[in-house]
Amino acid sequence: MWNDSVVSSAKEKLYSLIAPSCTLCAVIFLTGCSEPEAQPKVPSTVDAIAEVQSSSPTTIEPVPKVIIQDEADSPVPPEDKPATADVTPAAQPFEQYAGQSELLVAPAISIKDKDAKWSWPLFRGTELATGVSGSPLPPDDELQVLWQHKIKKGEIQATACLALLNGTPAAIVGDMDGLILALDLETAEVIWTYKIKFGYVCSPAFYNNRIYIGNIDGIFLCLDANGKLVWEYQAEMEIDGSPTFYEDLVLFTSQDSYLYALKAETGAFVWKVAAGDQLRCAPIVIEGLAFLAGCDATLHSIVLKDQTSGEGVNIESPTGCTPAVMGDLIFFGSEQAGFMAVDWKTQTRVWSYSDDNTVLSVHGNAAVTAGRVIFGDTTRRVHALDPQTGKKIWEAGLRSGVDGSPVIVGDRVFVGGLDGRLYSLSLSDGTIRWQKEFGGQFRASPAVGFSRLVIASDDGVIYCLGSTKR
């Protein structure tokens, strides 16, 4: 019999092979699930090993590199609670995943404005998934790596969430081995960790002082700001898309084709609505309508008040992209049909953009402002189009393809490549203004908040960039 680590590794490798191609949307992670309408499970360390570490003040010596904290080397003893018949697989011993932080500049640079308005609480930063940061970043010539955190044997494909945890600016990241950790943005210290068996390809969401995230085993979790499990819910298949919120509900999609609505406070099941095929995107809510771009080559719209849905918009190709919204238009790319804009009010396609010389395959999500919609593709290019007409404004060639999503910060566009490089492009003309090679591959996207840029690589390293100038 295979041990758990072999099974987990095999599943991750299979996932990495099929995830880029929605035309191969095979069901890999089959689970014996409870009925979706069941009440959420009571938190238990039979379900997961949760590590919560309180940060203590750390003295940082003024030297180029300082190891400031190691994660715990031994698991927390399980709570004295009886196991139930339907439980999440037991977590592996936590020492397998121990990592360490390195502060690369000294002393640490204080974050002056600890206001939630500078956070990055959702996958694409805003409720409309615009990929635009409200937080400034230092000029390119001042930008450098302030710290990095290496997860031992880790792999990260998910974008970080940047939020205030009990007043502390923090980066919250999930990895492919089932680890969620919160890192202090100023010091790189581990605030807390939470571990279950299977990992995450979607970004956490921070809402009302709680963290919400789903994993590749179909488990949707709610943690409090201290990293303690509040509730969990079992969907029927893998969860690839990050959650969003509507009134008192948390919404998320699954490869089982459903859009789920749960009570955000308690995890109680409210309703679910099926699309035609697997869903890998985050739902986007506009004036009571939820929009979902699916693997059935359809843009679905669902009325949240009564869960009715229309015929949808034919987009000609499967997609896992999360739509971005600006005004009356929704923007997203697809696996084989290029990039397009749809009027969400009339639910008609306004324009499409493709390449006559090659198939334009888009895996990441767009970033959009009033004058530009930006996206990357697998053929080593970043594109800027006019949002109203779809006319090309500029095209920038990179050294590798782009699986992640760009982020707009002022007059710059930041994007990570599969060559492990982070690029800063001019928003106006696409000129490469700055680039840095890190190693590994960037399948995750940048997150920008509190004057910091955080991005994680597939070799398990989380990087935080900023300025050393005060």
Image (tube, helix red, strand yellow):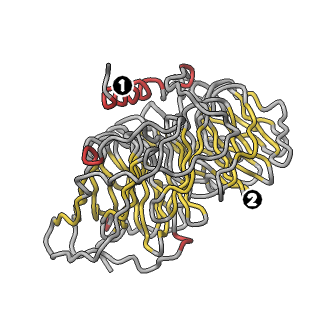
Looking at the image, residue 307 sits to the left or right of residue 430; the answer is: right
Residue 128 appears in the figure = no
Farthest residue, direction left = 63
At label 2, counting other C-alpha atoms closer than 10 Å, the crowd grade (few under 14, some 14-19, many 20 or more) is few
**In the rendered image, which quarter contains the N terminus?**
top left
User: Mark 1 highlights which residue?
Assistant: 10
Dot 2 amino acid type:
Glu
Looking at the image, residue 80 sits to the left or right of residue 244; the answer is: left
Number of residue marks: 2
Structural distance between the alpha carbons of marks 1 and 2: 39 Å
Q: What residue do we see at 46% from left, 42% from top?
A: 200
Position above or below: 181 against 32: below
Whole-percent x, y for residue 348 in the image: 80, 36
Q: What residue do we see at 38% from left, 47% from top?
A: 179
Q: What residue do we see at 84% from left, 49% from top?
A: 305
Nearest to the observer: residue 334 or residue 139: 334
Whole-percent x, y for residue 392 in the image: 59, 41
Circle on res. 401:
none
Q: What residue do we see at 16% from left, 65% from top?
A: 65
Task: Give the quarter of the image for residue 89.
Answer: top left
**In the rendered image, which quarter contains the C terminus?**
bottom left
Circle on res. 247:
2
At label 1, counting other C-alpha atoms closer than 10 Å, the crowd grade (few under 14, some 14-19, many 20 or more) is few
**At numbered mark 1, what does the secondary structure look like: helix, strand or loop?**
helix
Whole-percent x, y for residue 124 in the image: 56, 52
Dot 1 amino acid type:
Ala
Position above or below: 277 against 182: above
Whole-percent x, y for residue 86 in the image: 54, 36
